[in-house]
Amino acid sequence: MEAVRVTARDGIALEGILLKPPGPPAPLLVYFGGNAEEVTEGAAGATKFGMRALLLVNYRGYGGSQGAPSEPAIVSDALELFDWASKRSDVDASRIAVIGSSLGSGVAVQVAAQRPVKAVVLASPYDSIAEVAASHYRFFPVRWLVRNPFDSMSRAPGIRVPALIVIGAADTTIPPAHSKRLAAAWGGPHEELLLEGKGHNDLYGPEYDAAVRGFLDKHL
């Protein structure tokens, strides 16, 4: 485990950790977390993804990272982190995948649209934050009020790499219809895993872990 401190182009310091297996340059997973998630807490479960490196860096304003979060800043940071990681001699730059959970699915989609990722895993993803907000507040013009829309739907058709899309059938935070719209728009091959009885915060467990690892074994 290595402490990571990357300075963004505007001088903001981003902090997290990189976990690496021993041996030759390893394929890498870059994880983008959900709202209010301190991502380095996921370090203990890194081995469930197999002999792959795992990069866990907090968004601005989260954990030890400086600054304040916004969509443009978070996405810019994510692209810089991808570029930073791909230049490391202990990472196989031809085999980098992104994993996005909830809010982080929108970040992962934007990275996949702009960088040569090998595969994408999206857990509880959405078409856009604006559309999710509109489904919750049907009588208010929230589409015009959302400052960080994270519009994954407009980018998905142009992404050609394989995706695994994991959906909780009982998710009331991001209703399954939003995830299914994104899946239908995906430009490359994709697999959908609908977990019956699972909601937004209890999506993760043995079935999720097995599906993600199996997907990565095929594509990474």
Image (cartoon, rainbow, N blue to C red):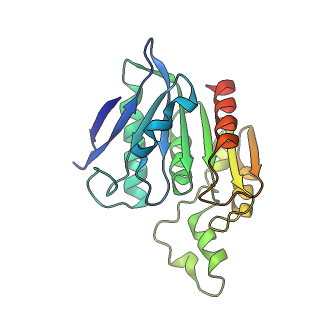
- Name the outermost residue toward the left: 11
Q: Position of residue 126 (x, y in %)?
A: 63, 59
Q: Is residue 190 left or right of residue 33?
A: right
Q: Split into 4 quadrants, where in the image is the N terminus? A: top left
What residue is drawn where x is 39% and y is 61%? 70
Q: Quadrant of residue 140?
A: bottom right
Residue placed most toward the observer, 202 or 136: 202
Please indicate, yes or no, whether residue 162 appears anywhere in the rendered image: no
- Name the outermost residue toward the top: 24
Please indicate, yes or no, whether residue 212 appears anywhere in the rendered image: yes
What residue is drawn where x is 63% and y is 29%? 216
Q: Quadrant of residue 209?
A: top right
What residue is drawn where x is 57% and y is 60%? 151
Q: Position of residue 14 (x, y in %)?
A: 29, 46
Q: Is residue 99 left or right of residue 59?
A: right
Q: Position of residue 65 (x, y in %)?
A: 29, 50
Q: Split into 4 quadrants, where in the image is the C terminus? A: top right
Q: Position of residue 46 (x, y in %)?
A: 49, 33
The answer to whether residue 140 is above or below residue 103 is below
Q: Is residue 173 left or right of residue 36?
A: right
- Name the outermost residue toward the bottom: 139
